[in-house]
Amino acid sequence: MKVRNILTTKGTNVITVRPEQSLQEAARLLAEYNIGALVALNETGQVVGIISERDIIRKTARQADAFSRPVGEVMTKDVITGLPNDDLVSVMHTMTERRFRHLPIVEQGELVGIISIGDIVKSQRDQYKGELDTLQTQIIADED
């Protein structure tokens, strides 16, 4: 299965933030949309970072005025991105080994979606359930 399959079901809408926006604004967006990460885009729409709930919590735990700081100060700048045609097993391996939960999906330099480790787990669960249902149907048919 490919990343594209998840995006087809999930959609391609991505909530983004600009590096100059405050952590307070980022936290508000995360809460408003009930999501775990925001992709940071520059003025031309290119991915320049990603910031997660964990990033914000860690910063606020260490710095009293953290919420007034810009996203660009806290975000991960070396963003690992995926492609719509990437294999889910490979993506899951990378996310697990590199210890991150959200993967922006880029195609021809444009942000086209984002997937989470939860999206991958749900996709695999659904795939296995489909395979199980098919096998059960075949067994019942063979018994008749």
Image: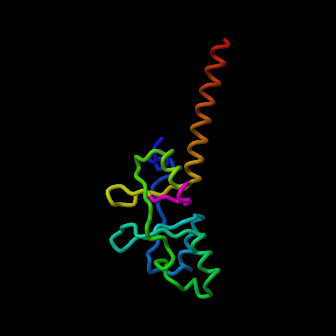
Q: Nearer the viewer, residue 127 or 76?
A: 76
Number of on-image labels = 0
Q: Residue 94, percent across and down? A: 50, 53
Q: Which residues are magenta?
A: 97-104
Q: Is residue 80 above or below residue 127?
A: below
Q: Residue at x 46, y 72 (%)?
A: 17
Q: Is residue 57 above or below residue 2?
A: below
Q: Residue at x 45, y 55 (%)?
A: 12
Q: Is residue 69 above or below residue 116?
A: below
Q: Residue 91, percent across and down? A: 49, 50
Q: Is residue 105 one of those drawn in magenta?
A: no
Residue 34 found in image quarter: bottom right
Quick check: 140 left or right of 27?
right
The residue lying furthest to the bottom in this view is 65
Q: Residue 87, percent across and down? A: 45, 44
Q: Residue at x 63, y 14 (%)?
A: 142
